Amino acid sequence: MQSRLQELKQAALTRLAEVTDAQQLQELRVKYLGKKGELTEILRGMGSLSAAERPLIGQLVNQVRSELEAAIADKQAALEQASLAARLAAEALDVTLPGRPLARGTMHPLSRVIEQAEDIFLGLGFEVAEGPEVELDHFNFEMLNIPKNHPARDMQDSFYITEEILLRTQTSPVQARTLLRKEGKTPVKIICPGKVYRRDDDDATHSHQFTQIEGLVVDKGIRMSDLKGTLLTFARQMFGEHQQIRLRPSFFPFTEPSVEVDIQCILCGGEGCRICKHTGWIEILGAGMVHPRVLEMGGYNPREVSGFAFGMGVERIAMLRYGIEDIRHFYTNDVRFLRQFHRVQGGTGR
Ligand code: PHE
């Protein structure tokens, strides 16, 4: 019996030395120490022993069991160590390898100008509104005091989809939509950035699709001076704090009186140069006091409230700000053009 136990121990230890993974270790544990294992089998055979031998053998069995348990535990610890070391080696990071450059996008200059304009007007208490690009003739023209056959329709050659539906030629229909939505409530104070479409032949300064920002304010006692102050603030924040603006009489069917607004030439500062055609001034937008008919059609009483509106071309502002000479650059998506705006500050960094 004693020798059988010794053999068993030796055999177990020999095989233990050969074990190389956790599964083999578990099998070995079951084989020798498990409920149906070899050691248990020996214990069962103890019935045939004499009363004198039993405690001795019992003690020996326990001793062998605890030796084997200890050896197995050691082996388990060693295996865990080894597998950790292997994992660390496999997952090792070579920090000396060159990095892979991440292609970084840039904000499109038009998006940037829109964001800057939104920042400026939000700071003045305006809300941003939106309207559909596929618009009803009703909102694009009729509600803006441009009835069918009005000569003013020729100012904006349109893409018609049906007789009543077109691609909007201006963001001004959002004025009409906003007035109806506000149901006579004041104040109305919105800007609306968005795409517009006109049947133009594309060249360096014309595009059949471009971007406008519309502005509309309606409240009691709104005057031309409010328009002028708002636009001066905008011009100074967009183009520099010493900027000056100039209002010239003009005509739009939905404003009366109407003006065109110039800023001082940002290239020559007013001296006169090629860009400003030697006038010192550059036109940036159209504006005026909301026509009483437009207020009326929008559900407002022109004897109680008044308002101003303006509309500017985003491309024009971006071209002036960044010295871009051809409007087509905005749409051809040449990355070499877009990449130049990596370093240009956006958003709040005017
Ligand atoms: N909608 C006009 C245009 O596209 C601009 C404008 C807007 C003028 C609002 C006056 C008031 O030319």
Image (tube, rainbow, N blue to C red):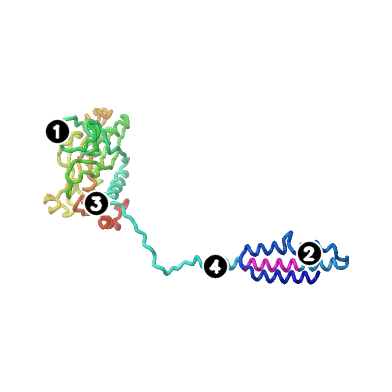
Q: Are marks 3 and 4 in contact (CB under 8 Å)?
A: no
Residue labelled with disc 1: 151
Q: Which range is magenta?
A: 64-78
Read off the residue under disc 4. Answer: 86
Q: Estimate how packed mark 1 is, as few (under 14), some (14 to 19) or many (20 or more) residues with alpha carbons within 10 Å.
A: few
Type of amino acid under label 3:
Thr
Query: What SS does tag 4 mark?
Result: helix
Circles 3 and 1: CB distance less than 8 Å?
no
CA neighbours of label 3 inside 10 A, class few (<14), some (14 to 19), many (20+)? few
Instruction: Between label 2 and label 1, give the one nearer the viewer.
Output: 2
Q: Which quadrant holds residue 260? A: top left
Q: Nearer the viewer, residue 148 or 264?
A: 148
x, y (%) of residue 46?
83, 64
Q: Are marks 2 and 1 in contact (CB under 8 Å)?
A: no
Q: Earlier in the sequence, mark 3 or mark 1?
A: 1
In the image, residue 335 sits, relative to residue 145, either above or below, namely: below
Residue in the image at 32% along x and 29% along y: 183
Where is residue 308, by image quadrant?
top left
Of marks 3 and 1, the one in the foreground:
3
The answer to whether the residues at label 2 and label 3 have Cβ atoms under 8 Å apart is no
**Sequence-first disc among 2 and 3:** 2
Foreground disc of the pair 3, 4: 4
Q: Is residue 101 left or right of residue 58?
A: left
What is the CA distance from the residue labelled 2 to the residue labelled 1? 114 Å
Q: Is mark 3 within 8 Å of ligand 1?
A: no
The label number, if any, that marks residue 42 in the structure image: 2
291 magenta-colored: no
Q: Which residue is mark 3?
A: 332
Q: Is mark 4 within 8 Å of ligand 1?
A: no
